[in-house]
Amino acid sequence: MTRMYLIAALVLALLAGLGVQTVRLANARTATAKAETALANEKADRAEDVRHAAQAALVQSETYRAEEQRRITAQKALDDDTHTKFAAAQVDAASAAGAAQQLRERIAAVTAAARRAATDSAIAGQRAATTDPIGMLADVLGRCDARAGLLADLADR
């Protein structure tokens, strides 16, 4: 009988040990499941953060691209305007050069006419002093005009 009690006690002890181990195993599984759920939630949060960061980077990239395109368009418009103004300045310079040449020719003609008048008149001796100032004035005006043309050309460049 004691043997029976002993075997029963041993079976009860084994069953109690088995029950304790089962509870410990269930608790471990529950803790593992909670940890896995927390890890999955953390991964989902990180994935959401990465998605938001990627979306923000895309928006910022598009903003930079739009600003770059705006600046390129503005620079092109400025270049076009500059080329248009430069072409107009070249046309004006050519027109001014033509007018200056006509002025030089007119001054030369007036100077020649004044010299001829001075030599043809009866009082050529009295007017001889005035022919040199006319020639000098024509020369000074011609040089001034040439210098102004040179300076204008340099300024245009």
Image (cartoon, rainbow, N blue to C red):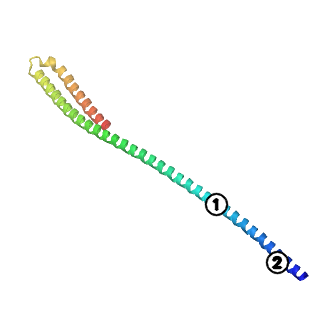
Q: Residue furthest right?
A: 2
Q: Secondary structure at mark 1?
A: helix
- The answer to which quarter of the image holds residue 82 is top left
Q: Residues within 10 Å of mark 2 (few under 14, many from 20)?
A: few
Q: Who's the residue at 30% across and 34% down the image?
A: 151
Residue 37 image label: 1
In this view, the residue in front, 49 or 15, is 15
Among the 4 quarters of the image, the one containing residue 20 = bottom right
Ranked by sequence position, the earlier of labels 1 and 2 is 2
Q: Is residue 14 above or below residue 106?
A: below
Counting the numbered discs, the total is 2
Q: Which residue occupies 8% across, 21% down? A: 120
Considering the numbered disc 2 on the image, is that residue within a helix, a strand or a loop? helix
Image check: 37 left or right of 86?
A: right
Residue that carries the numbered disc 2 in the rendered image: 11
Q: Is residue 157 visible?
A: no
Which of label 1 and label 2 is nearer to you? 2
Question: What x and y, as percent, mark residue 142?
Answer: 22, 30
The amino acid sitting under disc 1 is Thr
At x 59%, y 55%, the residue is 45
